[in-house]
Image (spheres, grey):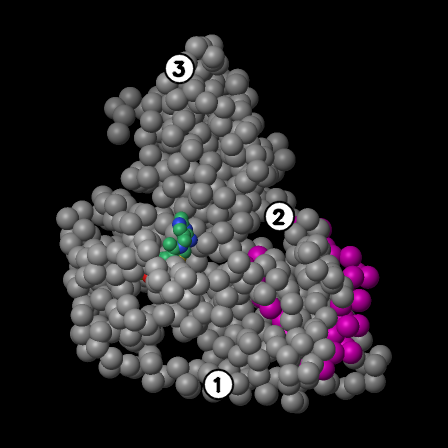
């Protein structure tokens, strides 16, 4: 802590004040001289801004991204010039794919020496333009506050996403003037999306009224844009079977009568209309190809996004709408009954047969899971881990997945009770999000359970940041699914070539001892019967705790697609 508490007025102080106006309370960072004024600005702000210093810049950006995805307020990461910035590229790209409002502030070699070969002198924005909403440089100390304000406004405007700004050294260290930003010129409330075109909603309502086997897919943007209550109400009002995707999971709690995610292949295979809201028609949704199974015609596809640029262009759509998702669902909930009445139907025709059929299929699938969730197999079947975890998870738990097969199991068998409690890397599929996401989750939800499900391969990307959890007293439970292999690559390579290489890790490696060496705690579990008690010890520990579960490498996740 600095002894002298005079208000700072350098560019760094202006940047911190502007970030705070947008609701930022934590700066995730890894030190470098180019960005010292941002720390000085954080320390001397009133109240000081919390600094969480990590062990790799990608962890800082993943933490900022998870902050945005959990709190729906923007996240902030600060990284030093050159390698500090280039180390963030995968994490910024992850935020780009996820539409996460993140601002990354980078240091930058000074302008007055530019071209002379200064330390870490590289022009960062061209590296980041393709994966950000905007990437640019601020050169003037007096303009830093305005530039940072602009960065946050852009990051939070529809369609949300990452923004990069680097600040030349003299601008960050130089005098920005006595007046710190105290009110943002354009206001600090995130810009709202315009409502969708009423004609588009009507057209969608008309299609739905003529459908007999519709399915509603709720994706991450439904949660990220705050439309979950409107979506839930519309689904309930219209009795629509729902498949949840990404952070849309939990909008309908596990066990909800309309939630048919576990019957998604039956639902998508036989649907005659699929309405996808708040997520791209990417590989996770079979590129938007639905229906056509068992002699059925291909389904009509309706795509709804929060902004026109996010509507699918790679396949024909029966209809689409772009705009505020809350407004969309609210309008849909009244437009469909009107359209049904006009078509002479008293109630949604799908409510009597199609919905119960899918609900029964979902119930059957869940019942069929039970044997493996309770499996006594030795070595441990990965599903047993989830059977045990489900018994100790609270409704408000945050569950994070970073890994291959181990996390695919989790995605399938752990059904959240609330939205905003499930974090996977999203469609960019980047390994290494785990510790950054876990750090952010603990900061954002101080009293909730935070559980990180970590493949043993994935562990290698970020396990050192257990040190950050320890230094900042952030207890989380880490469950390492340790099969000694990169399973999600090993089995596909064997299927293609009949053999595999570069897919083996150390069997039985003691990742729990890594956690201990860093000041946390942990244990290795090799027997299924020991799992339950180990998980309880982990939740009770009050320190970062890694349960290293040795699972059966012979068990491969029954995957139908590799995403390519
Ligand atoms: C940064 C990055 N590198 C490589 C991959 C390719 N990849 C996807 S899953 C996977 C295997 C993950 O292994 P592990 O975490 O041990 O989980 P398992 O499949 O064994 O359960 C790999 C290498 C990736 N998605 N991201
Ligand atoms: Mg593995």
Bounds of the magenta span?
A: 193-222
State the separation of the CA atoms marked 1 and 3.
Answer: 64 Å
Tell me which numbered mark, 3 or 2, is placed earlier along the sequence: 3
State the separation of the CA atoms marked 3 and 2.
Answer: 37 Å
Disc sitting over residue 118 in the figure: 3
Disc sitting over residue 159 in the figure: 2
Query: Label 1, on which residue?
Result: 363
Rendered location of residue 258, percent (x, y): 57, 79
Q: Secondary structure under badge 3?
A: loop
* Residue 51 left/right relative to 428: left
Query: Which quadrant of the figure has residue 220?
Result: bottom right
* Residue 314 left/right relative to 41: right
Tell me which numbered mark, 1 or 3, is placed earlier along the sequence: 3
Residue 196 sits inside the magenta stretch: yes
Query: Which quadrant of the figure has residue 354?
Result: bottom right
* Residue 414 left/right relative to 538: right
State the separation of the CA atoms marked 2 and 1.
Answer: 36 Å
Camera-side residue of 529 and 150:
529
Q: Secondary structure under badge 2?
A: loop
Do labels 3 and 2 touch, CB within 8 Å? no
Q: Is residue 312 visible?
A: yes
52 over 455 or under it: above or below: above
Image depth: mark 2 or mark 1 in front: 1
Query: Which quadrant of the figure has residue 321?
Result: bottom right
Residue 347 sits inside the magenta stretch: no
Tell me which numbered mark, 2 or 1, is placed earlier along the sequence: 2
């Amino acid at each position: 802590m600095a002894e002298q508490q005079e208000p700072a007025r350098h560019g760094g102080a202006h940047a911190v004040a502007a970030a705070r106006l947008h609701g930022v309370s934590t700066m995730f960072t890894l030190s470098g001289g180019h960005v010292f004024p941002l720390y000085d600005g954080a320390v001397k702000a009133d109240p000081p801004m919390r600094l969480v210093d990590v062990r790799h810049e990608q962890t800082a950006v993943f933490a900022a991204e998870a902050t945005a995805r959990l709190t729906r307020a923007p996240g902030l990461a600060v990284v030093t010039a050159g390698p500090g910035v280039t180390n963030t590229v995968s994490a910024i790209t992850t935020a780009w794919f996820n539409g996460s409002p993140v601002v990354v502030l980078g240091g930058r070699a000074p302008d007055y020496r530019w071209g002379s070969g200064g330390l870490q002198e590289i022009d960062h924005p061209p590296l980041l333009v393709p994966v950000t909403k905007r990437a640019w440089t601020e050169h003037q100390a007096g303009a830093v506050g305005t530039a940072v304000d602009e960065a946050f406004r852009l990051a939070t405007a529809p369609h949300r996403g990452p923004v990069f700004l680097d600040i030349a050294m003299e601008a960050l260290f130089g005098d920005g003037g006595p007046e710190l930003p105290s009110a943002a010129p354009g206001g600090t409330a995130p810009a709202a999306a315009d409502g969708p075109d009423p004609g588009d909603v009507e057209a969608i309502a008309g299609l739905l009224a003529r459908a007999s086997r519709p399915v509603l897919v709720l994706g991450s943007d439904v949660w990220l844009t705050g439309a979950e209550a409107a979506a839930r109400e519309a689904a309930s009002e219209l009795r629509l079977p729902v498949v949840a995707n990404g952070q849309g999971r939990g909008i309908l709690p596990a066990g909800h009568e309309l939630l048919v995610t576990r019957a998604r292949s039956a639902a998508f295979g036989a649907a005659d209309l699929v309405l996808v809201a708040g997520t791209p028609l990417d590989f996770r949704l079979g590129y938007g190809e639905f229906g056509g199974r068992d002699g059925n015609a291909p389904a009509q596809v309706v795509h709804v996004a929060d902004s026109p640029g996010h509507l699918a262009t790679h396949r024909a759509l029966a209809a689409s709408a772009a705009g505020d998702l809350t407004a969309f669902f609210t309008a849909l909930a009244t437009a469909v009954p009107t359209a049904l009445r006009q078509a002479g139907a008293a109630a949604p025709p799908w409510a009597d047969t199609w919905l119960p059929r899918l609900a029964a299929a979902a119930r059957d699938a869940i019942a069929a899971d039970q044997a493996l969730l309770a499996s006594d197999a030795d070595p441990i079947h990965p599903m047993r881990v989830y059977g045990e975890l489900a018994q100790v998870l609270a409704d408000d738990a945050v569950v994070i997945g970073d890994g291959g097969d181990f996390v695919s199991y989790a995605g399938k068998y752990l059904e959240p009770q609330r939205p905003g409690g499930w974090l996977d890397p999203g469609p960019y599929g980047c390994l290494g999000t785990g510790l950054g996401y876990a750090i952010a989750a603990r900061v954002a939800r101080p009293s909730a359970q935070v559980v990180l499900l970590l493949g043993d391969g994935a562990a290698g990307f970020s396990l050192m940041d257990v040190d950050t959890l320890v230094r900042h007293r952030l207890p989380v439970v880490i469950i390492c699914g340790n099969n000694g292999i990169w399973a999600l690559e090993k089995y596909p390579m064997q299927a293609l070539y009949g053999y595999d290489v570069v897919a083996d890790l150390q069997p039985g490696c003691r990742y729990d001892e890594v956690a201990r060496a860093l000041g946390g705690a942990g244990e290795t579990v090799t027997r299924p019967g020991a799992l339950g008690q180990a998980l309880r010890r982990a939740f009770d520990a009050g320190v970062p705790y890694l349960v290293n579960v040795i699972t059966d490498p012979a068990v491969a996740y029954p995957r139908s697609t590799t995403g390519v």
